[in-house]
Image: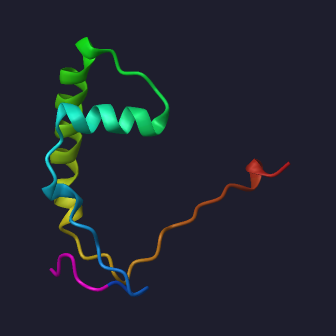
């Protein structure tokens, strides 16, 4: 499997899993999102984000360059 190779649209897959999640990362993300993470909760948010990243790591290794997103609609969703 190819990782971080060229995409169909000419963009490369970003190596997002290599950047460490730190308390500063959480504070910056909260600022961008316009939310407040209390100082006493920052360490638990860091731990949760690291756990999510670890869980998604096998998916990041998949070469999905020729796979289009699946769009599923249900006719009951229309008004």
What range is drawn magenta here?
A: 1-6
Question: Residue at horizontal 36%, vertical 38%?
Answer: 29
Q: Taken as a whole, is the magenta stretch helix, strand or loop?
A: loop
Task: Please state the horizontal and vertical placement of residue 70, each as a whole percent of the image.
Answer: 50, 67
Q: Residue furthest right?
A: 79
Q: Is residue 77 above or below residue 24?
A: below
Tell whether 63 sits left or right of 54: right
Q: Indicate whether residue 19 is drawn in magenta.
A: no
The part of the image, by quadrant, that contains residue 21 is top left
**Above or below: residue 20 compared with residue 24:** below
Q: How is the image coloured?
A: rainbow
Counting every numbered tag in the picture gives 0
Q: Which residue does the image show at 33% across and 81% down from the upper left?
A: 65
Residue 30 drawn at (x, y percent): 39, 32
Establish if 52 lies above or below 77: above
State whether residue 49 is above or below residue 39. Answer: below
For the point 47% across and 37% down, which residue is it?
A: 33
Q: Residue furthest top?
A: 40
How far from the left and from the top, in percent, is residue 71? 57, 65
Give the quarter of the figure containing the N terminus: bottom left
Residue 13 point in image, percent of width and height: 29, 73
Q: Residue at x 20, y 31 (%)?
A: 23
């Amino acid at each position: 499997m190819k990782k971080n190779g060229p995409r169909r649209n000419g963009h490369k897959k970003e190596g997002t899993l290599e950047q460490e999640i730190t308390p500063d990362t959480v504070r910056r993300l909260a600022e961008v999102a316009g939310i407040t993470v209390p100082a006493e909760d920052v360490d638990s948010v860091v731990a949760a984000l690291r756990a999510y990243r670890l869980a998604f790591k096998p998916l990041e290794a998949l070469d999905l360059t020729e796979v289009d997103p699946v769009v599923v609609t249900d006719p009951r969703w229309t008004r």
